[in-house]
Every structure is written in structure tokens, then in C-alpha cells.
Amino acid sequence: MILRTLSRMSVTTRDLSRLARHESTLKSCFDESGGEGLILKSSSTDIFQNLALEDWIHDRVDLQSRSVLFLWRNAPAVVIGRHQNPWQECNLELLRRTGIPVARRRSGGGTVYHDLGNINMTFFTSKKKYDRMRNLGVVTGALKALSPNLDVCATERFDIILNGCYKISGTAARLGRKTAYHHCTLLCSADRSILSSVLKSSCTGIKSNATPSVPSPVTNLSDHDPSLNPSSLMDAIASCYNKEFDLDCPVLTVDPGSEVMMPGIHKMTSDLKNWDWVYGKTPKFSVCTSFMVDNTNVGLEIEIKNGVVESCIMDVHHDWLPADFVKEFCSSLIGIRFCPNEFAVAVAAFIRTTSSSPQHTQNTLRLYENIVSVM
Ligand SMILES: Nc1ncnc2c1ncn2[C@@H]1O[C@H](COP(=O)(O)OC(=O)CCCC[C@@H]2CCSS2)[C@@H](O)[C@H]1O
């Protein structure tokens, strides 16, 4: 039975034989799946696991013969677009302090904040069937079905706005050669104060060609209709999806932590967590800034490529730190990741290995404190 269901999904033969060995575990996910469509809901609230499940569906499921709607929510997280700069888009210092992760998704577009009050939907189709407005129609249809008086509409840039001006949903997409997915958010009851504080850069003076986000005033649906909650919204979206695409799919719960059910997903999850993906994929940029230390102005220009310091120039009065010493300090930073941990290690090694007066050591530490605040 499971083999027949999976054949209809056209998962690769290799997967099929591997999956067949775990029939009983797979049943819960695929047993009742219909022919042309599938609605999945994640049991995980881990941003990396959920993005990995998107990758897994995109890579392993034949989307020529069926469409998939994937519904998911995350614990607090910031999600940047494929071509963005996290130093430019968010308050990394605040995120580290609060333990909120930054994730880079595979689709383009801007940065958004997720928590359990925010729903995510991913619409997978063949490239031919890719239609963002139709998908957003499913979302606005679900909202109108639950709360007929809400004034919601999709915009030209594929946001959904409430009362003509408040954004409740943002869209991004990934288009492959033959398949595509469109994913979007829906703000039901997210923490707006955290949303706005984490989406403010803590790094001044960034010069970059990375895709900038387009900030908008946002609102939560539950502030306009307190009867709305994430769970009833997901049910309504699933039912409108079935109606719009003439399907009759149940909502199947999937655990993206299960390697048995989705072979290869652990590697996909760890790739998404990797520093080299989250930070290292940032397009080349520079930080050009200045700060005051002990009434001395310090000019700083750092170039960062693949998340790593490529060049560093510091302009400091020679009475405060001798020019040769500053040059040596700058050289010691080349090749380190632009992040507090590696910077601290590099500065400690520099101090340990360079002969300097107590005053120069003190001043180096003052430089450290100021530079680390832009990382
Ligand atoms: N959760 C959420 N929903 C809607 N709008 C948001 C959200 N968080 C922040 N914002 C607002 O959108 C802008 C950025 O708008 P911008 O248009 O630049 O970017 C987007 O909308 C990207 C949407 C990505 C959707 C994916 C779906 C699954 S994984 S993430 C930000 O500055 C805030 O003003």
C-alpha cells in the first residue's frame, strides 16, 4: 500500500527502496495521501528543520505530477533572504543575547521575524503551475471565510495588507528549472515589539550590494479579530487550498527531525545551520565607520568577503597608538570570520604575542570593545 502511494508521488527509486524498509514509520505521513496534491504540517518549530524539509520536498518529491502545501510555524527566529547581509538586516547583538537564531533561506527577498504567532505556508508546484496570486487568493479566501469583515488584499509585490496599509504577509520564491515554490508568512499574534527591535541593524556604516529589505508597518490579525488563532487559520488555509485546487487532501503531520522518514534531511538541516551558509554567503561588503575613544577619533574600514575579513585599515592618532603597532593589529585580523568569537581569539593572540606597553595593551582592548559592537 505504502509503495503504491509513494510510486504515485514519484519519489526516486533509490528513495523508494530505502523508504520501504521503514514502512510502519512512514505510514503516518504518506498513507492517506491523494493523487495530485498533498498537505503537510510540520510537527517541529525549529527553523532549520523546517527550512530543511522545504529543501527535501523541493529536491526529492516529483512536483511535476503533484502540488504540495506545507504549513509550518517556528519558535522565535529571524529569516533572511538568500542574497542578504545579516549584519545589515538585524540586530545581531540582541539576537545573540536573547538566543534567537538567524537563518538564511534559499529563496530571495527580505528579512522577516517568526514566532509561534506567525504562520508560514509553502506552495510547491511545477514551474508551469507556479502562480503566487492564486496562492495568496487561498490565504485571503481563508481569512474572509473565518472573518468576513476583514479588509485584506494582496498587493502588486505579493504582500497581503490589512486595512489598505498594514502588512500581514510577506512573500518570497525559489524557481528551479522545472519546479518552483512560493512561500509566505501570515502574522496572527506575533510579538511586534521583538519583531521591530530585532529587525534593526546594530552595525553602522555598511556598504553593500546585498538585497535590502523593504520595511512596512505590520499588524497582527488577532488585534483586528480576537477569534483568529494560528491553528484555526491553518485549518482554514488547508480547506481553501483543497477547494481552490479541487483536491480532497487531509492534513498530514510530518516530523522533519526524522531521518528515517526523510533520508538525507539531517545533512540538509546541518547545512542550513552552518556559519558558512548563514553568514559566509553574504555578498562582499565593507564597514566604514568611526568612533571616539579617550577623546581620540578612530576611523575604521574593514572589507568582508565570504564573511571573512579581507582587509582592515584603522586611522588612529599616533600618540594614542603608534602607526606600526596599529598596522600589525590590522594585519592580525585578516582571515578571521567577522564575528565576536573569532575576533576575541585573534585580539587575545595579538596581545599575547606582541610586545607592547601596558598602555598600548589597554588601548588595544578599547579598540576591541568598539569594533566588536559592529559584529
Ligand atoms: N512575519 C512577518 N510577516 C510579514 N511581514 C513581516 C514579518 N516580519 C517582518 N515583516 C515586515 O516585512 C519587512 C520585510 O519585507 P520584505 O518585502 O523585504 O521581505 C519579505 O516580506 C520576505 C518574506 C519572506 C517569507 C518567507 C516565508 C517562509 S520563510 S520567510 C520587514 O522589515 C517588516 O516590516
Image (cartoon, rainbow, N blue to C red):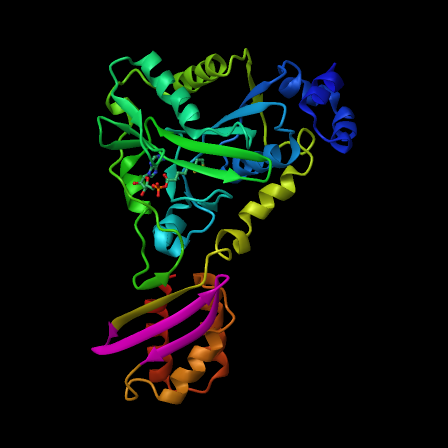
Q: Which residue is drawn at 29% across and 45% down?
A: 197
Name the quadrant containing residue 15. Answer: top right
Ligand 1 visible in quadrant: top left
Observer-nearest residue: 275 or 89? 89
Q: In this view, does 153 lie to the left or right of 46?
A: left
Image quarter (top left, top right, bottom left or bottom right) of the N terminus? top right
Up-down: is 332 above or below 257?
A: below
Q: Who's the residue at 48% across and 61% down the image?
A: 307
Q: In this view, does 170 lie above or below 33?
A: below
Residue 220, located in which quarter of the rendered image? top left
Percent from the top left, x then y, of residue 33? 62, 16
Residue 230 in sight here: no
Q: Residue at x 74, y 21 (%)?
A: 23
- Dominant SS of magenta comes to strand
Q: Give the range drawn in magenta.
A: 292-315
**323 vs 145: above or below:** below
Q: Position of residue 370 (x, y in %)?
A: 32, 68
Q: Residue 319's image quarter?
A: bottom left
Taking 94 as reference, is 69 left or right? right
- Count up the numbered dots: 0
> At which x and y percent is residue 145?
35, 12
Residue 28: x %, y % from top left: 64, 18
The answer to whether residue 352 is left or right of residue 1 is: left
Q: Is residue 188 visible?
A: yes
Q: Which residue lies furthest to the front in this view?
A: 128
**Per the image, is 293 magenta?**
yes
The answer to whether residue 30 is left or right of residue 363 is right
- Front residue of 344 and 46: 46
- Pick the quarter of the image with the C terminus: bottom left
Q: Which residue is drawn at 55% across and 33% down?
A: 127
